Image: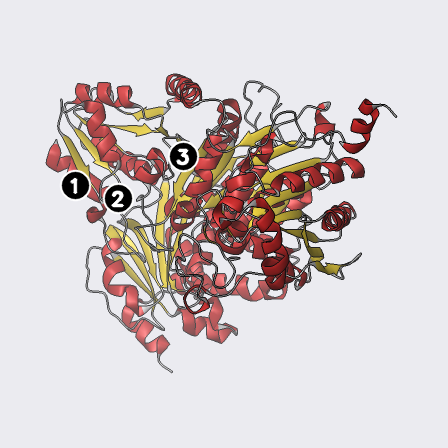
């Protein structure tokens, strides 16, 4: 075996739907991995011609320039409302939103709840890093109890700031939801499970069943003030303890 | 006349707006220009409810005007304000069964119409508005009564209210008769007593 | 093209005009006094293959308008003052990505919850100067009859598409409620370019990708604003609309828009019948504002009377237009008569003011 062949086997090519050029995510952030999984799943399902993605504010806003499908966004909060209009106007398209925990659990909670109540046939890629990453790591609805952030300098106290927001469980509790699961990409095995979950969610949208959501746990090294490798431990020990991984709902049919 | 203007004031549920809407619908086949302005509070029942109708051969500059040729008062709460909205020489119609007032203005013609009492005698107090409309049409000749009947048919035919059509038409005609045989305030007092 | 005449309320005329313009998608939320528009669309759109969506509030409505506008289809919403305030954020985003949409604002009266069932023109400044952030413009059209509402809604869709801009059709309680005879006619406009920027999936566009990011992360700040300024300049040059009424030889110029222009017009008729030389200039577009026409007519008359059902907002633009060269008087919301649930400014009151000034 020649050396070049070894390289070809070990390093795989970037996904076709990832537009050329670097992304802007910080070292140790998992958004790049999640972006890759998203590209792969859309490509493998053969839906790139029908796919339309809506990004939120914050770190995933610029995914409009990373994915080679129709994209819009950069707006903090109302992603599912925007996506709803597109899906209602073009029911044959596959519409997904990429939104952070501040969006689904705080500023866009109303839009999120309303879309769940209506059972919109969308896919939400929900990125949970337990803080507002872009703005400097302030407390988010998902910040762990006791966790220090720039707006909870003494650590999050549930008596004044409430308890962590569980988006995937909330989605699973709604009648109009077809798929809801929580995944992480901090180990290779979890990455495989995450991709399977994302695929299952898109599949349910393709089948026209109902609302679909995949919550991704992801670290924010600069704001967590941990090294990329310590972030992996933090996810394993702290994040998953609060936010258990798994599939909370997956149904082929919703009775109307 | 080239233009007729009327304001109808009642409380929600009395049918002041239907009076106006029917007149506007009937008026459109005789006049090139019609405006109907329903003005009511955001309360489904019992709130103040007023409308202004103008039917005209000329373009209608404003659909609202303070002084009008005719005013219909269906409830005592409007007497004080709305009697001032009749132009000198104009006409004021009161449902004398529910409005006990005697109007003192001498520069207008006042018709005391026992509309609610007539409606009850016809079988349903809710057609008092149509008794008043019949009276208004007979007194002013703004449009022929038949056109209003046609407008009513257009609304009620084929719907839940179809069975009420004869009653509604009779109310209109009763209103017209009250004008034909109109005997003034004293006569009305006698008619309204039970 | 001429068509059937029907007796139609202003609010219903909005819906009919939109459907004539090819709008099949409406996003709405109940608020008085625009409910008849949403109800009309909810009833009619499904019959023509369209969609009515009612989300959790006007904020979401406006974001649905954003998503809908980006599909390239003609989309509309209608609201009233508090709802319009809730929409400002999304309107700013619509402006940022230059998405065309039509918003009908049926004004109610006053700040806060205002007065659902009352007449007012108290949103002039918000509508014409932009309630959202970022120095954008919306084109604002102010019809004054049911026929104009029907026609101008069609015009609004055309202008929205032509300039990729949000067009606001501004009416109020009176105009929304007044029923008048309207001729159902389809207005013909110049052909428009293809919306090659629309989101519909690459498969519908020979593999071409569309991308819209609200914000100026890429592409440069000056590039964006210089494009906007060019566009705004063209709109000012080509789309400024107004109407004069009996202004020839007038010694007093009334300026009013929307329902108050009807009231002012009636006062002009009455004043002329009594031998007074009074005319009316009615801005039809509130932005672009007919600054030069008001200046010329105002200077020719020698004095101006602004009639508006507001403490005084339009009057500020009129004062700027005449540049202090002639006196500008104001008949405002305090000139209401009381009859009716809320009081209204009647032609008689305007005439009284005209007599005092002439």
Residue B133 screen position, x and y as percent? 43, 58
Nearer to the camera, A2 or A248: A2
Q: Earlier in the sequence, mark 3 or mark 2?
A: 3
What kind of element bears circle 1? helix
Residue depicted at x 40% and y 65%? B178
Q: Is residue A66 visible?
A: yes
Residue depicted at x 22% and y 44%? C311
Q: Relative to C232, does residue A225 appear above or below in the rendering? A: below
What kind of element bears circle 3? loop
Residue A5 screen position, x and y as percent? 83, 25
In this view, the mark in front (1 or 3) = 3
Q: Is residue B35 left or right of residue A47?
A: left
Tell whether label 3 touches label 1 (CB within 8 Å): no
Tell whether label 2 touches label 1 (CB within 8 Å): no
Residue corresponding to mark 3: C143
Disc marking residue C352 = 1
In this view, the mark in front (3 or 2) = 2
Q: Quadrant of the N terminus of chain A?
A: top right
Residue C48 screen position, x and y as percent? 67, 41
Q: Relative to C225, does residue B65 appear above or below in the rendering? A: below
Discs 1 and 3 lie in a common subunit: yes
Q: Tell me the quarter of the picture where residue C282 sits.
A: top left
Q: Earlier in the sequence, mark 1 or mark 3?
A: 3
Discs 1 and 2 lie in a common subunit: yes
- Label 1 and label 2: CA atoms lie apart by 18 Å
Nearer to the camera, A104 or A242: A242
């Amino acid at each position: 075996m020649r050396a070049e062949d070894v390289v070809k086997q070990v390093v795989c090519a970037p996904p076709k739907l990832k537009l050329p050029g670097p992304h802007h995510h910080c070292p140790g952030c998992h958004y790049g991995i999640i972006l890759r999984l998203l590209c792969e799943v859309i490509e493998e399902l053969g839906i790139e011609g029908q796919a339309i993605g809506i990004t939120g504010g914050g770190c995933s806003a610029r995914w409009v320039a990373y994915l080679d499908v129709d994209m819009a966004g950069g707006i903090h909060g109302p992603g599912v409302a925007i996506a709803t209009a597109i899906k209602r106007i073009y029911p044959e398209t596959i519409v997904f939103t990429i939104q952070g925990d501040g969006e689904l659990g705080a500023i866009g909670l109303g839009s999120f709840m309303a879309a769940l109540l209506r059972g919109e046939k969308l896919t939400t890629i929900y990125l949970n890093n337990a803080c507002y990453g872009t703005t400097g790591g302030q407390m988010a609805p998902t910040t762990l109890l006791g966790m220090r952030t720039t707006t909870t300098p003494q650590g999050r106290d549930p008596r004044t700031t409430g308890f962590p927001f569980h988006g995937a469980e909330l989605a699973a509790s709604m009648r109009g939801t077809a798929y809801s699961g929580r995944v992480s990409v901090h180990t290779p095995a979890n990455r495989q499970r995450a991709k399977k979950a994302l695929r299952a969610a898109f599949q349910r949208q393709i089948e026209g069943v109902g609302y679909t959501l995949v919550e991704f746990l992801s670290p924010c090294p600069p704001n967590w003030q941990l090294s990329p490798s310590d972030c992996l431990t933090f996810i394993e020990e702290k994040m998953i303890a609060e936010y258990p991984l798994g599939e909370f709902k997956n149904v082929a049919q919703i009775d109307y | 006349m080239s233009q007729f203007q009327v304001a109808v004031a009642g409380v929600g549920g009395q049918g002041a707006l239907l009076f106006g809407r029917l007149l506007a619908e009937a008026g459109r086949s005789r006049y090139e220009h019609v405006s109907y302005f329903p003005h009511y509070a955001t309360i489904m029942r019992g709130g103040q409810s007023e409308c202004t109708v103008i039917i005209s051969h000329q373009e209608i500059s404003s659909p609202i005007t303070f002084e009008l040729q005719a005013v219909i008062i269906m409830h005592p709460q409007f007497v004080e304000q709305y009697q001032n909205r009749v132009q000198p020489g104009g006409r004021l119609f009161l449902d004398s069964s529910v409005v006990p007032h005697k109007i003192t203005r001498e520069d207008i013609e006042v018709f005391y119409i026992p509309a609610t009492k007539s409606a009850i005698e016809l079988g349903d107090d809710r057609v008092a508005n149509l008794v008043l409309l019949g009276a208004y049409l007979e007194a002013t000749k703004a449009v022929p009564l038949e056109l209003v009947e046609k407008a009513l048919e257009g609304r009620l035919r084929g719907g839940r209210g179809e069975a009420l059509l004869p009653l509604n038409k009779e109310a209109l005609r009763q209103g017209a008769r009250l004008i034909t045989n109109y005997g003034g305030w004293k006569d009305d007092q006698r008619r309204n007593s039970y | 093209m001429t068509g059937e005449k029907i007796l139609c309320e202003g609010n219903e005329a909005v819906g009919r005009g939109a459907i004539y313009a090819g709008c099949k998608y409406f996003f709405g939320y109940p608020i008085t006094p625009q409910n008849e528009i949403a109800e009309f669309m909810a009833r009619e759109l499904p019959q023509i293959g369209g969609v009515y969506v009612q989300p959790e509030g006007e904020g979401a409505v406006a974001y649905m308008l954003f998503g809908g506008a980006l599909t390239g289809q003609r989309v509309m919403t209608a609201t009233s003052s508090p709802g319009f305030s809730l929409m400002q954020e999304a309107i700013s985003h619509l402006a940022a990505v230059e998405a065309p949409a039509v918003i009908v604002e049926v004004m109610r009266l006053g700040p806060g919850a205002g007065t659902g069932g009352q007449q007012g023109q108290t949103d002039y400044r918000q509508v014409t100067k932009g309630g959202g952030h970022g120095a954008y413009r919306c084109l604002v059209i102010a019809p004054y009859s049911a026929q104009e509402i029907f026609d101008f809604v069609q015009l609004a869709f055309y202008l929205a598409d032509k300039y990729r801009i949000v067009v606001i059709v501004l009416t109020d309680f009176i105009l929304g409620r007044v029923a008048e005879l309207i001729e159902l006619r389809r207005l013909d406009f110049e052909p428009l370019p293809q919306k090659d920027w629309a989101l519909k999936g690459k498969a519908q566009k020979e593999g071409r990708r569309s991308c819209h990011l609200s914000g100026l992360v890429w592409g440069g700040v000056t590039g964006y604003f210089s494009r906007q300024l060019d566009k705004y300049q063209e709109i000012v040059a080509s789309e400024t609309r107004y109407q004069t009424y009996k202004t020839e030889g007038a010694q007093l110029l009334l300026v009013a828009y929307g329902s108050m222009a009807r009231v002012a017009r009636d006062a002009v008729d009455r004043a002329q019948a009594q031998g007074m030389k009074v005319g009316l200039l009615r801005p039809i577009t509130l932005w672009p504002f007919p600054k030069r026409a008001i200046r010329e007519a105002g200077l020719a008359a020698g004095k101006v009377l602004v009639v508006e059902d507001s403490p005084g907002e339009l009057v500020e633009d009129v004062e700027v237009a005449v540049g202090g060269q002639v006196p500008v008087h104001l008949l405002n919301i305090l000139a209401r008569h009381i009859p009716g649930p809320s009081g209204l400014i009647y032609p008689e009151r305007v005439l009284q003011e005209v007599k005092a000034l002439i």
